Amino acid sequence: MPLTESERKLRGSVAGLTGWANTADRKTRAAHAARGHYEKFYAATDPELPEDLRARMADSAYRAHMKRMAFKSAKARRLRKEEQERRAQARREGRQAETLDGGAA
């Protein structure tokens, strides 16, 4: 039977945390991942351009990508918070309505 989305997320989280738990040199592991990301953006630049220009372009593309991810994360956190606030308000209004009508439903 296939895993649910929630189960896949939990499995991925466990795998990631286990990997970091077994990593003594965290800085090198993180640098390796960042370098791989950077190389993807460098490869997307025009190979006929001078190396220093390609490096600057790749750096800008990498930074823009990271900013886009930060923006999406902030937006998702805001939306989650707003939804939690809406639900809390609905619960408060429901309790208040029960109090006003004496609990008769």
Image: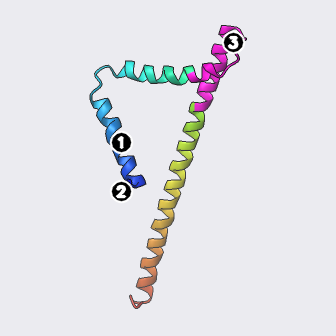
- Residue 81 sits above or below residue 92 on the image: above
Q: Is residue 64 magenta?
A: yes
Q: Which residue is mark 1?
A: 13
Residue 18 occupies which quadrant of the picture? top left
Residue drawn at x 32%, y 36% is 17
Residue 59 visible within the image: no
- Residue 51 sits above or below residue 97 on the image: above
In the picture as drawn, the residue positioned furthest to the front comes out as 1
Residue drawn at x 48%, y 68% is 89
* Amino acid type, label 3: Leu
Q: Using residue 54 as the reference point, say whether residue 101 is left or right of it.
A: left
User: Mark 2 or mark 3, which has the lower sequence index?
Assistant: 2
Q: Which residue is mark 2?
A: 1
Residue drawn at x 44%, y 86% is 100
User: Mark 1 or mark 3, which has the lower sequence index?
Assistant: 1
- Residue 18 sits above or below residue 94 on the image: above
User: Circle 1 — which element?
Assistant: helix
* Magenta stretch bounds: 40-65
Of residues 93 and 54, the one drawn nearer to the viewer in this rendering: 54
| Image location (x, y in percent) of residue 59 | 61, 20
Q: Using residue 30 as the reference point, say whether residue 82 is left or right of it.
A: right
* Amino acid type, label 1: Ser
